[in-house]
Amino acid sequence: MPTSRRAERLGVVDHVTRMGPSPAGRVGDQRALTPYTTAGFAHAKAFVFQRWCEMAAEQARPPPSDLSGACKYGSLFVREVFGGVIEGHYAHQFNRLDGRLVDLSHDALDVGRMRQPYLNDEDYFRIPEYQRRLAACMPRVHGWVHGFLKEHGLER
């Protein structure tokens, strides 16, 4: 799968661009850095929400009330920390870990307004422009992952 020149230059040719979508239209399977637990999910959700608030402040946007609009970052974060794959469609993406649907933004207002948020469009993640968008998120996601692991004493 071709990668963007910017991603290559920054050294962020990561799992998204190296592995690309799986045959089922998912973003490549990733091994877990830490096992998935309900407590881990709660910590991850709170951590990502805090980072989402910081990102809003950096961009001079109003503080968010939930993880609406954060599904790209949240699903990449979950995949990096807990493993699994990313599934979704044009309006929402989420994770699947050992067959279990995992979504940090499951209770966000934007997800609640969707008629069918958990459909998986088998072709969506194959779109090169979307692959570039995911790759562009990875430097921030990697920073979040490092901070999360460090904060929770899981740094390797």
Image (tube, rainbow, N blue to C red):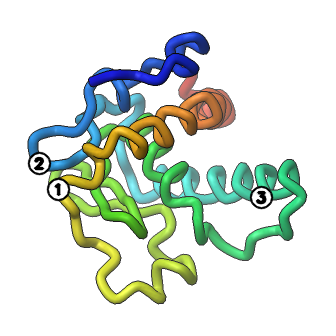
Q: Amino acid at mark 1?
A: Glu
Which residue is at a point 79% across and 57% down the rendered structure image? 56
Label 1's element?
loop
- CA separation, marks 3 and 1? 31 Å
Q: Residues within 10 Å of mark 3 (few under 14, many from 20)?
A: some
Q: Amino acid at mark 2?
A: Ala
Q: For the N terminus, give its image quadrant.
A: top left
Could you say which quadrant of the image residue 129 lies in? Answer: top left
Mark 3 or mark 2, earlier in chain:
2
Left or right: 63 in relation to 72: right
Could you say which quadrant of the image residue 46 lies in? Answer: bottom right
Q: Report the disc number at residue 122.
A: 1
- CA separation, marks 2 and 1? 6 Å
Check whether the beta carbons of the residues at disc 2 and disc 1 lie within 8 A of each other. yes
Left or right: 128 in relation to 45: left
Front tag of 3 and 1 = 1
Where residue 121 appears, as percent x and y from the top left, is 21, 62
